[in-house]
Image: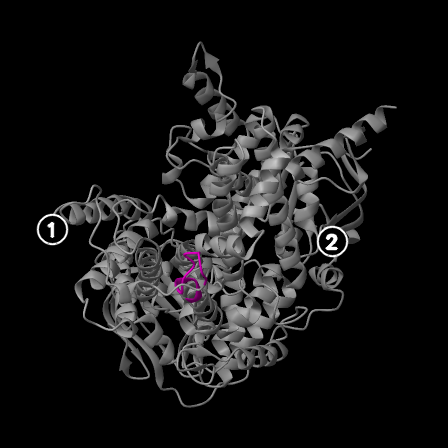
C-alpha cells in the first residue's frame, strides 16, 4: 500500500484555469519521488493542495491508508507533511534553534526553554547528518545552510513526508550535491520526500521514481532506473528535445565591444577588489560564480545604478562612466535583469506598456511628450509575433503571463533594436525547458549578429553550452578566465570555491 | 476592461449603500426617522436647480483635492499634504486679490489662480525634494507641513496682514473684480467649478496619454523597475509633488476667491484630507474622483438643509463619511476573509460527508 495516494484531484482557479485535471499518483514510504513538469504544468498547485494551502474541487488524498482532509497547513503538519519552500521563511536575526522552534517553543513557566530547544535541534541535526549549529545566527548562514534549517524546522514538527519545492534552484552545484546527501540520509532515517524540479539530471541522480505533469495532467510515472533523461523530457514537453544548439562560428572580426577596466562596484563588503574583462563582438562571455560574489554589484555598476562605482566601462570605445542608466541604454547597452518581476517588468501594467518602457521617451512613440498609443500597441503586436509571446492580446497585464512569457516580454523589449552589448543575468532562472531553449537561441542569434553578450548564470551547464569564454567571479574579482576548450566542470567548480593555483591567478 | 469597470463601480455602489444603511440604522436607534431624513437630504441635494448648484459648489474643492491626491497616489506617493498646499494657495490667491486692486478682473483672476497654484506647488516641492533627493518618507513630512501651513497662514492674517476691526483671523476682502463670477442666481456656485472640470480633463489626459503619465504609472506600480529602465525617478517625484501641490493650491484659491472673498484662517476643515477619501472611493481614477466628489458634495450640501428641517444634526453626514472610509477599507480585506471562510466551510462539508 502506498504511503501517499492522490486520487483524481481536480482544481480550477477562478477565471477558468484548470490547474490540476484528474491527478493520480502515489508515493511509497521511504522513497524520493520526483515531480517534474514545465512551468504551469500544475506542480505548485498540487503541492499547495497537499500542504493545505489550496482546496481541491474534487478528489481524495490518502495518507498511510487513511483519507486525509488537509484544510490548512497546520493540518498538514499534524499529519506529518512538511514543506520546504523555495523562498525561505526564516527570521535572519534569530538563531537557528530559535527559528526552528518559533511557534513551537518549549516553555518553562512564562519563558521559552532555550536549553531544551537547542538540545532537540542538535539531536535532530546529528540524527539526520545536517551539521547545523543551533546557535548560529541565520543571517550568517549560506543559502544552502538556510535551506537545511528549513528542513530541520519541518523535522522538528515531526514531518515524515517532506515536500521540497525546487530546492536546487537557489543552490550552487556543490550545495546541490550536499543537499542530495542530506535527502538520502533523511530517507534512510525513515522519511519520505517529494522533490519538485525542472532539472532532469537531478531526477536521474536522486529520485527512485518520478511523476511527470503536463498541462495539469499526469502523463506518466517512471522508474528512473529504467528510462533515459530524453524520455522524461519527451513526456514533459510532448516532443523530443532538439539536440544541443549548434553554435555557428561567429563573425570573424573581433573588436572589443565592452571593456571593463579596474571597475570598483562600491560594494561595502567587496572593497579593494576590481573587475577587469572585455567582451568581443560575436562573443558570449560567461560569468560563473556562487551567488554573492559580486554579480549584483557588477550588473548594477554596468547599467549605471551604482553612483559610487569607480573605473572605466567602455562601450564601443565610449566611456560610460558618469552616464545615467537611460544614457547607457541609449548607447546600446541592454539588460535582462536577474529578477524579472522586480527589475525587468511592471507586472500590473499591460504587455504593450511594458514593451514600450525603453522607447516611450522618444520618437516614434512620443511626440512632444504625448504618447502615440496606437503606435505603441502596433509595435507591441509585432514584437509579440516576433518573439512568440503567447497572450490573448497586447492589452493584458503582464501579471497574467507565465514565467516564460513574461521573460519573453523582457527579451523582446531589450532586443527590439539589436544592442551593442547585452547583459543577461540569470536569464533562464525558473523557466521551463521550452522557454529556456528560446532564450538560449536568442543569445546565440545575438552572438552571430556580432553583439557582445555577457551571460551571468548560476547554471554551469548553461554557461558551458553557450559561452566562448567563462570567467569565474570570486569575492568581487575575476579569478580566472577559461577559454571554452579548457573549461571543465571540475576546474570551474574549484575556481568558484576560490581554489586556483597561484600562478594561474592572474 | 469594460467588465472590470462595471465590477468596481458596482462594488463602490454596495459600499456606499452599506454606509447609508448603517448611518440610517444609527438614526433609527437614536429615535429619528431615517427614511424621512434621507428624503430631505435627497431633496435638498438634488431636488431643485438651486440645490443642485449647491451640491456642485460643495463638490468643487473636493474635485481639486481628490485630483491632487490621485496624481500622487498614482506615482505611489502618499501625499497627505494637500491640506497644507490648499492653505498656502488660498492665501496667495487672496493676497493677489486684495493687493492688485487696480487690475481688471480678466487679468486679476488668472493671476490670483496662478499665484495660488504656484505657491501650493512650491509647498508640495518641499516634501517632494526631501523624498526624491534624501529619501525622507513623505507621509511624515507632509503631515507635519500641514500644521506649518495652517498655523503660518493664520499668523499672516493675525499679524502682518491683520485687518483692524475684524473679529476673526481673516484677511481683507479681495477686490470686487477678483471675486469669481457666479454661474447661477442665489447660489455661490462659481467658475471655479468649471476650472475643476478642466483640471480633471487635464489630469486624465496627463495620466493616460503623456510620457510623464507613463512614468508616474510605472513609478507607482514598480519603482525598482522604473529605476532599472533608467526613468528619471527623482524628476518624476518632484514633478508629481509639484503638480499635486499645485492642484491643492487651486482648490484653496477657488475657495478664497469664490466663496469667502478673502482668506479666512482655518477655513478648510479638512478639505485636503477629504481628497484621500475621494480618491479611495473613486477607485484611483479621474472619473471616479468626479463621481465621489459629487456624491460627497451632495451629502454635505444636503446636510445643512436637512438640519434645518429635521431633527437630524449634520453630524450624521460626518458619520456617513466615516462609514464610507470604513467600508472602503473593509472592502479590501473582505475578499480574503470570504475566500478563507469559503475554503474552510468546503473542507468541513467534505469532512462531514466522509464520516457518514
In whole angstroms, how far apart are the C-alphas of marks 2 and 1? 81 Å
Residue B75: horizontal and vertical position, in percent?
A: 41, 59
* Of A185 and B150, the residue lying toward us: B150
Identify the residue at image location x=58%, y=41%: B40
Q: Quick one: label 2, few (<14), some, or many (20+) residues within 10 Å?
A: many
Dot 2: chain letter = A
Residue A31: horizontal and vertical position, in percent?
A: 70, 39
| Vertical side of B265 occupied by A107: above or below | above
Residue B45: say if magenta: no
Work out which quarter of the rendered image holds the N terminus of chain B and state it.
bottom right
What mark, if any, has residue A212 been given in the picture? 2
Does mark 1 fall on the same chain as mark 2? no
- The residue beneath circle 1 is B160
Magenta segment, prevailing SS (helix, strand or loop): loop
Do the numbered discs 2 and 1 sit on residues whose CB atoms are within 8 Å? Answer: no
- Residue A88 appears left or right of A62: left
Identify the residue at image location x=51%, y=65%: A427
* Of B263 and B48, the residue lying toward us: B48
- Residue B262 appears left or right of A240: left
Work out which quarter of the rendered image holds the C terminus of chain B and state it.
top right
Residue A367: horizontal and vertical position, in percent?
A: 43, 83
Residue found at the far front of this picture: B186
Q: Quick one: label 1, few (<14), some, or many (20+) residues within 10 Å?
A: few
In the rendered structure, which segment of residues is drawn in magenta?
B184-194
Identify the residue at image location x=63%, y=56%: A198
Identify the residue at image location x=43%, y=16%: A113
What mark, if any, has residue A413 been given in the picture? none
Q: Is residue A339 visible?
A: yes
Amino acid at each position: 500500500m502506498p504511503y501517499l495516494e492522490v486520487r483524481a484531484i481536480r482544481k480550477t482557479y477562478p477565471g477558468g484555469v484548470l490547474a490540476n485535471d484528474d491527478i493520480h499518483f502515489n508515493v511509497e514510504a521511504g522513497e524520493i519521488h520526483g515531480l517534474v513538469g514545465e512551468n504551469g504544468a500544475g506542480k505548485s498547485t498540487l503541492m499547495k493542495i497537499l500542504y493545505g494551502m489550496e482546496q481541491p474541487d474534487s478528489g481524495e488524498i490518502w495518507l498511510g491508508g487513511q483519507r486525509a482532509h488537509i484544510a490548512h497547513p497546520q493540518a498538514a503538519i499534524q499529519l506529518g507533511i512538511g514543506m520546504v519552500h523555495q523562498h525561505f521563511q526564516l527570521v535572519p536575526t534569530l538563531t537557528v534553534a530559535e527559528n526552528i522552534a518559533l511557534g513551537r517553543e518549549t516553555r518553562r513557566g512564562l519563558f521559552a526553554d532555550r536549553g531544551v530547544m537547542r538540545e532537540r535541534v542538535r539531536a535532530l541535526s546529528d540524527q539526520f547528518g545536517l551539521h547545523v549549529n543551533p546557535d548560529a545566527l541565520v543571517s550568517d548562514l549560506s543559502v544552502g545552510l538556510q535551506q537545511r534549517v528549513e528542513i530541520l524546522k519541518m523535522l522538528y514538527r515531526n514531518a515524515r513526508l517532506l515536500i521540497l519545492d525546487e530546492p536546487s534552484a537557489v543552490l550552487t552545484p556543490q550545495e546541490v550535491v550536499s543537499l542530495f546527501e542530506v535527502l538520502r540520509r533523511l530517507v534512510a532515517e525513515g522519511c519520505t520526500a517529494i522533490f519538485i524540479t525542472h532539472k532532469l539530471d537531478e531526477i536521474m541522480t536522486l529520485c527512485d521514481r518520478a511523476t511527470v505533469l503536463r498541462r495539469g495532467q499526469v502523463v506518466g510515472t517512471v522508474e528512473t532506473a529504467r528510462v533515459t533523461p530524453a524520455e522524461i523530457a519527451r513526456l514533459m514537453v510532448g516532443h523530443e528535445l532538439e539536440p544541443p544548439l549548434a553554435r555557428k562560428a561567429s563573425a570573424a572580426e573581433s573588436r572589443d565591444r565592452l571593456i571593463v577596466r579596474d571597475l570598483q562596484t562600491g560594494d561595502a563588503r567587496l572593497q579593494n577588489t576590481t573587475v577587469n574583462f572585455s567582451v568581443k563582438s560575436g562573443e558570449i562571455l560567461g560569468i560563473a560564480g556562487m551567488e554573492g560574489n559580486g554579480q549584483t554589484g557588477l550588473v548594477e555598476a554596468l547599467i549605471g545604478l551604482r553612483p559610487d562605482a569607480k573605473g572605466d566601462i567602455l562601450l564601443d570605445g565610449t566611456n560610460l562612466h558618469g552616464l545615467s542608466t537611460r544614457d547607457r541604454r541609449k548607447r546600446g547597452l541592454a539588460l535582462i535583469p536577474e529578477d524579472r518581476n522586480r527589475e525587468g517588468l511592471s507586472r500590473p501594467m499591460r504587455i504593450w506598456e511594458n514593451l514600450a518602457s525603453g522607447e516611450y521617451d522618444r520618437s516614434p512613440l512620443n511626440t512632444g511628450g504625448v504618447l502615440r498609443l496606437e503606435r505603441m500597441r502596433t509595435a507591441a503586436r509585432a514584437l509579440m509575433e516576433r518573439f512568440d509571446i503567447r497572450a490573448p492580446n497586447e492589452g493584458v497585464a503582464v501579471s497574467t503571463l507565465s514565467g516564460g512569457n513574461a521573460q519573453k516580454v523582457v527579451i523582446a523589449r531589450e532586443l527590439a533594436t539589436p544592442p551593442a552589448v547585452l547583459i543577461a543575468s540569470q536569464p533562464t532562472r525558473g523557466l521551463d525547458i521550452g522557454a529556456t531553449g528560446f532564450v538560449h537561441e536568442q543569445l546565440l542569434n545575438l552572438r552571430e549578429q556580432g553583439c557582445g553578450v555577457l551571460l551571468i548564470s548560476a547554471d554551469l551547464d548553461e554557461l558551458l553550452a553557450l559561452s566562448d569564454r567563462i570567467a569565474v567571479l570570486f569575492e568581487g574579482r575575476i579569478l580566472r578566465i577559461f577559454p571554452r576548450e579548457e573549461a571543465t566542470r571540475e576546474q570551474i567548480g574549484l575556481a568558484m570555491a576560490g581554489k586556483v593555483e597561484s600562478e594561474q591567478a592572474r | 476592461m469594460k467588465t472590470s469597470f462595471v465590477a468596481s463601480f458596482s462594488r463602490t455602489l454596495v459600499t456606499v449603500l452599506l454606509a447609508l444603511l448603517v448611518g440610517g440604522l444609527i438614526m433609527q436607534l437614536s429615535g429619528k426617522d431615517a427614511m424621512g431624513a434621507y428624503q430631505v437630504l435627497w431633496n435638498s441635494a438634488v431636488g431643485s436647480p438651486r440645490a443642485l448648484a449647491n451640491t456642485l459648489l460643495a463638490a468643487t474643492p473636493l474635485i481639486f483635492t481628490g485630483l491632487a491626491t490621485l496624481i500622487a497616489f498614482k506615482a505611489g506617493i502618499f501625499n497627505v499634504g494637500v491640506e497644507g498646499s490648499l492653505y498656502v494657495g488660498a492665501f496667495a490667491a487672496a493676497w493677489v486679490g486684495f493687493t492688485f486692486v487696480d487690475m481688471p478682473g480678466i487679468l486679476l483672476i488668472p493671476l490670483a489662480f496662478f499665484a495660488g497654484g504656484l505657491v501650493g506647488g512650491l509647498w508640495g516641492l518641499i516634501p517632494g525634494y526631501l523624498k526624491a533627493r534624501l529619501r525622507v518618507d513623505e507621509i511624515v513630512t507632509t503631515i507635519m507641513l500641514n500644521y506649518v501651513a495652517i498655523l503660518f497662514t493664520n499668523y499672516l492674517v493675525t499679524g502682518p496682514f491683520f485687518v483692524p476691526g475684524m473679529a476673526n483671523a481673516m484677511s481683507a476682502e479681495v477686490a470686487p473684480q477678483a471675486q469669481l463670477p457666479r454661474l447661477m442666481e442665489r447660489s455661490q456656485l462659481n467658475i471655479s467649478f468649471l476650472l475643476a472640470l478642466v483640471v480633471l480633463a487635464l489630469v486624465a489626459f496627463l495620466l493616460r496619454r503623456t510620457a510623464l503619465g507613463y512614468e508616474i504609472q510605472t513609478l507607482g506600480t514598480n519603482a525598482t523597475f522604473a529605476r532599472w529602465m533608467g526613468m528619471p525617478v527623482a524628476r518624476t517625484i518632484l514633478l508629481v509633488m509639484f503638480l499635486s501641490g499645485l492642484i491643492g493650491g487651486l482648490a484653496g484659491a477657488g475657495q478664497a476667491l469664490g466663496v469667502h472673498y478673502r482668506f479666512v484662517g482655518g477655513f478648510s476643515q479638512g478639505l485636503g484630507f477629504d481628497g484621500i477619501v475621494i480618491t479611495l472611493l473613486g477607485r484611483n481614477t479621474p472619473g471616479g474622483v468626479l463621481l465621489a466628489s459629487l456624491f460627497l458634495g451632495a451629502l454635505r450640501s444636503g446636510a445643512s438643509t436637512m438640519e434645518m428641517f429635521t431633527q437630524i444634526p449634520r453630524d450624521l453626514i460626518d458619520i456617513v463619511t466615516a462609514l464610507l472610509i470604513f467600508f472602503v477599507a473593509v472592502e479590501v480585506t473582505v475578499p480574503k476573509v470570504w475566500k478563507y471562510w469559503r475554503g474552510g466551510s468546503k473542507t468541513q462539508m467534505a469532512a462531514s460527508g466522509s464520516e457518514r
